Image: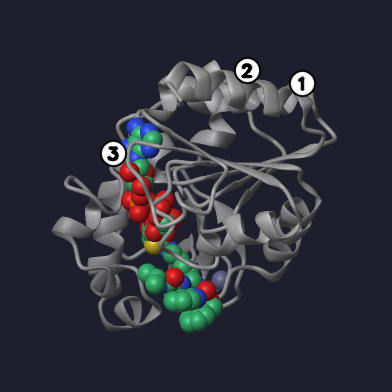
Amino acid sequence: MTTDDQIHLARTHLASARHVTVLTGAGISADSGVPTFRGTDGLWRTFRAEDLATPEAFERDPRLVWEWYNWRRELIATKQPNPAHIALVELERRRPDTFWLITQNVDGLHRTAGSQRLSEIHGNIWKVRCTGCGIISENREVPLPILPTCRLCQALLRPHIVWFGESLLGEDLRRCDQALRNCDLLLVIGTSGIVYPAAGFASVAKEVGALVIEINLDSTPQSDLVDLSLQGRAKDLVPLLL
Ligand code: BJW
Ligand code: ZN
């Protein structure tokens, strides 16, 4: 099948689907200039995840972790949503009651683009959480003073991000499970499909008989499982599906 045929088929499926769920990963924001994690220019090529994205790393050296997040906040602050983010806003607008977007991205670009029916399952880089009283607040200060502390209780603040070995919010997991079990089409965009639990979402959708379409620059561990695998840039392919 040619790419044009695949796109035509994907469009037809999308137009006839009742409940549509979308899962996105770093690849959708790569087209906005936000670095991905894996791959040749990925963050994990230069930085060790276990030194920066685990609760143990933060306990050991909160300054180092905050410096890394400050650098990323500065970088992301200069980035804008791209046509793929915007196409997903349009998809939500067309089917407001039968659409849910699950993102692993912490950059907030889906929300900036206008997506509202959205679970940010790995958190958001523009939110901080108090390690003392647990309060979560939005914080767009760039750079943040290191080390940032809570206004209410003076304890250390941490990024409101899900690190390796930490559980996702139960409420998010329930919402996602519902969106996956109810959907008849799952669109998986720009994720390597390695990090759990999101790496298992395509299997959940397949189990309930949904059609799964993947959009990625490369093949992934999920490519053999999905019904249609479109290879290319998210910013080019996602708008073509509408
Ligand atoms: C393009 C493109 C373009 C590029 N267009 N495409 C079961 C089995 C084994 C292990 C586990 C398991 N369950 C849990 C675990 C442990 C762990 C895990 O999954 N480890 C794996 C690495 C094996 N999971 C967890 O710890 C999770 N917690 C949890 O499950 O709690 C319960 C539990 C704990 C422990 C044991 C068992 C249960 C939490 C995971 C949190 C992940 N957080 C991170 C880092 C946050 C730090 C931060 O951002 O500040 O979130 S990891 C990092 O990876 C980040 C991402 O959201 C996540 C996914 O990455 P993503 O989005 O897929 O990006 P890439 O870079 O990997 O891929 C980009 C893709 O885009 C590529 O495919 C490109 O080809 C493509 N692409 N340009 C289209 N223009
Ligand atoms: Zn506090």
For the residues marked 3 and 2, what is the alpha-carbon distance in whole angstroms? Answer: 30 Å
In the picture of the structure, the residue carrying the numbered disc 3 is 75
Task: Using the rendered view, name the quadrant where residue 173 is placed.
Answer: bottom right
Q: Earlier in the sequence, mark 3 or mark 1?
A: 3
In the picture of the structure, the residue carrying the numbered disc 1 is 94
Asked if residue 239 can be seen in this view, the reply is no
Q: Residue furthest right?
A: 97
Measured along the vertical axis of the image, is residue 49 above or below residue 10? below
- Quarter of the image with the C terminus in it: top right
Q: Residue at 49%, 68% (x, y): give it.
A: 196
Decide: marks 3, 1 in contact (CB < 8 A)?
no
Q: Residue at 56%, 75% (x, y): give it.
A: 167
Decide: marks 3, 2 in contact (CB < 8 A)?
no
Query: Residue 200: x, y in percent?
Result: 56, 64
For the residues marked 2 and 1, what is the alpha-carbon distance in whole angstroms? Answer: 10 Å
Question: How many C-alpha atoms fall within 10 Å of the one at disc 3: few (<14), some, or many (≥20)?
Answer: some
Q: Which of marks 2 and 1 is nearer the N terminus?
A: 1
Question: How many C-alpha atoms fall within 10 Å of the one at disc 1: few (<14), some, or many (≥20)?
Answer: few
Q: Does the residue labelled 3 lie within 8 Å of ligand 1?
A: no
For the residues marked 3 and 1, what is the alpha-carbon distance in whole angstroms? Answer: 32 Å
Query: Residue 193: x, y in percent?
Result: 44, 56
In the picture of the structure, the residue carrying the numbered disc 2 is 242
What SS does tag 2 mark? loop
Decide: marks 2, 1 in contact (CB < 8 A)?
yes
Query: Residue 134: x, y in percent?
Result: 60, 72
Q: Which of marks 3 and 2 is nearer the N terminus?
A: 3
Q: Which amino acid does label 2 sit on?
A: Leu
Q: What residue type is labelled 1?
A: Arg
In the picture, measured across the screen, residue 158 lies left or right of residue 33, that is right
Query: Residue 31: x, y in percent?
Result: 35, 29
What SS does tag 3 mark? helix
